[in-house]
Image: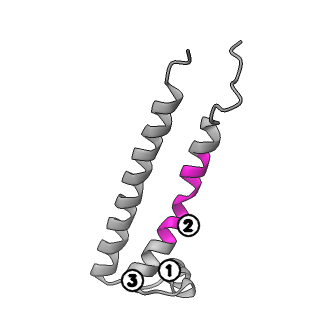
């Protein structure tokens, strides 16, 4: 069994933190971009009747999600690269 170095990063923890940060990052970004308060964000999510979102708000929501997931993908690739480094 391989000995774990003291300074070796915990890849599983890093991946978990990166993935679980999405909802918070998304919520903050969309509230800022659309000038919504937190209650407005949650009210728009819960709306089950007629949609309250304009076409621009929908496009903004999609663009924010794509931007955040792209940044997450880059970060996950960095974690993978660090984890796959040879240990000499």
Spatial separation of the CA atoms under disc 2 and disc 1: 22 Å
Q: Which residue is drawn at 54% across and 64% down?
A: 23
Q: Which residue is drawn at 47% across and 67% down?
A: 26
Q: Which of 32 and 85 is in front in this view?
A: 85
Residue at far top of view: 1
Q: Is residue 17 magenta?
A: yes
What kind of element bears circle 3? helix
Q: In the rendered structure, are the residues bearing label 2 and label 1 in contact, judged by CB atoms less than 8 Å apart? A: no
Give the vertical position of 63 relative to 36 (above or below). above
> Residue tagged by mark 1?
48
- Residue 88 is left or right of residue 73, and the answer is right
N-term-proximal mark, 2 vs 3: 2
Q: What's the residue at 55%, 67% (across, down)?
A: 24
Task: Tell me if residue 51 can be seen.
Answer: no
**Dot 3 corresponds to which residue?**
34
Majority secondary structure of the magenta segment? helix
Q: Give the range drawn in magenta.
A: 16-27
SS for tag 2? helix
Res. 62 visible in picture: yes
Residue 25 in the image: state x and y as whole percent. 50, 66
Q: Which label's residue is closer to the chain start, 2 or 1? A: 2
């Amino acid at each position: 069994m391989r000995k774990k170095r003291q300074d070796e990063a915990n890849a599983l923890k890093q991946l978990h933190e990166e993935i679980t940060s999405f909802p918070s990052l998304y919520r903050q970004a969309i509230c800022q971009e659309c000038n919504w308060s937190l209650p407005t964000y949650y009210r728009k999510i819960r709306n089950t009747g007629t949609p309250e979102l304009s076409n621009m708000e929908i496009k903004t929501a999609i663009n924010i999600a794509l931007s955040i997931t792209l940044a997450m993908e880059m970060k996950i690739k960095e974690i993978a690269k660090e984890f796959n480094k040879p240990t000499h």
